[in-house]
Amino acid sequence: MAAPGAAGGGRSGAPAAEWGGFEDNMQGGGSAVIDMENMDDTSGSSFEDMGEMHQRMKEEEEEEAEGEAGAGEEEEDGEFLGMKGLRGQLGRQVADQVSAVPRSPPVPGFCLPARPLPAAFSPQMWQVGKRQASRAFSLYANIDILRPYFDVEPVQVRARLLESMIPVKMINFPQKIAGELYGPLMLVFTLVAILLHGMKTSDTIIREGTLMGTAIGTCFGYWLGVSSFMYFLAYLCNAQITMVQMLSLLGYGLFGHCITLFVTYNVHFHSLFYIFWLVVGGLSTLRMVAVLVSRTMGHTQRLILCGTLAALHMLFLLYLHFAYHKVVEGILDTLEGPNMPPFQRVARDIPVVSSAVLNTTAKAIALTL
Amino acid sequence: FVSVQFPGLADVSISQDIPVEGEITVPVGSHSPDEDYSTLDESVKDTIMRDLKAVGKKFVHVMYPRKSSALLRDWDLWGPLVLCVSLALMLQGGSADSKDDGGPQFAEVFVIIWFGAVVITLNSKLLGGTISFFQSLCVLGYCVMPLTVAMLVCRLVLLAGAGTVSFIIRLIVVGAMFAWSTLASTAFLADSQPPNRKALVVYPIFLFYFVISWMILTFTPQ
């Protein structure tokens, strides 16, 4: 971007008197060019283009020089799928039919004949609609849609994992979010595995379901549900973020959760958990909040979005810890044997503060023996 | 017309009458139609023994993981089914509360293994792998065999007692079998990936076998 930058600098330098307003707002010293590098480049539109390109290639393979069709009626299948983009494709498909008609084997010396007028209208439209529907089905049943979101290298994944714990400082400029799904998906599965471990060691008894089902439901429900909710809020608050980016951001935010739970499910100290909750959970929340703030305008909107996200993220970590937390007195009892002084067993539904106090007291007593 | 645009090709004469002919065969062990018809006439014992031999050969491949394409070429899902069912049966009855019946445990293990394998297969395909869906399922299923052996050993050890020593023995056995499973499946699956992305494919496999081996390790019979 050196040449446009230089041109922009030269351009803004000369009429400095009239365009003086630019100088105040520029960041890189007089460049009037908006640096598009930091805007997201994996937004949904490129996905739709990719899907369309794929479909075009497939349709070019299987196309025969078929009949004509004008721009015609809507097809019921288009409504069933319910997407405007599909109808746009229908129109383009119909136009392709028209342009594809004279695609006979090239005979040199002939120019292509003019587009013939449609003779029979509705059978062609039905053919086109049927083909469109089957193509739409194969498009959505094709996992190749997801391929661009899994196009990562291991070093990139590692870099993004570490970045997810570092809050950014520059919130005046929209921060780039990588729209990939491999890292978040693997983090969610890791969280499921850690949660399973926590549930098993805390002897959680699930009556109406299975341990595995609960763990998977909790983690995936959080990831998908909170992402959708935050995307909806972002739409209301006019933030510049797409669904895939939101999924990716929240997914990488679960890295802090994984670390915290991995440590605190094995080392059972409440105070340690609180420290981890504040530090690790706080760092990943700050990072997500900073990225969101950089993409939102207006104080009220920023407050709504970031407050909601911070609250949900931190409360989820709290919930994961305490819902499946082993009663610590049970461990102490089995470890120390009959030498334990009699102390009061604490049931699980006592407020956590008093149980934390009791835990530390009991441990202190045990250690002095 | 052509010679005006590409003067260098003036002496190349392309007749439009020569048909393009040749043979495109995929070098996979496909049977000719004659063989297919003849297998209808053989005795049932021959058919069963042939399938059993194929399954047994694959088990041997898992035990000594070498890079061979036999496991991939003729995939079958008999072995994974048998392993999955036996593992799920052995893991039954390990719930903490004796009032629970063994139902959810069996279904849990079954669903974990098959859905886990499907997810890993989809992941490796999305990362650019060249292996097909059922081939990958076949490999992942067969590589559960060391963990089934570990489950058997754990049950036997638990018959003797459930103290710290038995826990350490079980931990070592399950750990070793877990490493064996992961290495065996990696030997088959990682070759089909682009070389710089092997780690991305290996991690879900690691997680998958980790969950299964953790289920085996934390099993306590009633």
Image: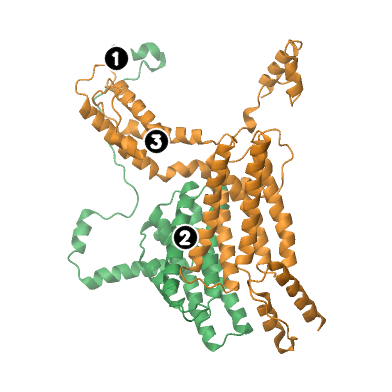
Q: Which residue is mark 1?
A: A112
**For residue B24, side relative to residue A187 (left or right):** left
Report the amino acid beneath label 3: Met
- Closer to the chain start, of discs 1 and 3, is 3
In the foreground, A99 or A90: A90
Q: Which residue is mark 3?
A: A83
Q: Position of residue B202 (x, y in %)?
A: 54, 56
- Chain letter for the part of the structure drawn in green: B
Tell me the distance, in whole angstroms, between the alpha carbons under discs 1 and 3.
Answer: 35 Å
Tell me the distance, in whole angstroms, between the alpha carbons under discs 1 and 2.
Answer: 55 Å
Point out the frontmost of discs 1 and 3. Answer: 3
Tell me the distance, in whole angstroms, between the alpha carbons under discs 2 and 3.
Answer: 33 Å
- Chain letter for the part of the structure drawn in orange: A
**For residue A325, side relative to residue A19 (left or right):** left
| Label 2: element kind | helix
Q: Residues within 10 Å of mark 3 (few under 14, many from 20)?
A: few
Q: Which residue is mark 2?
A: B116
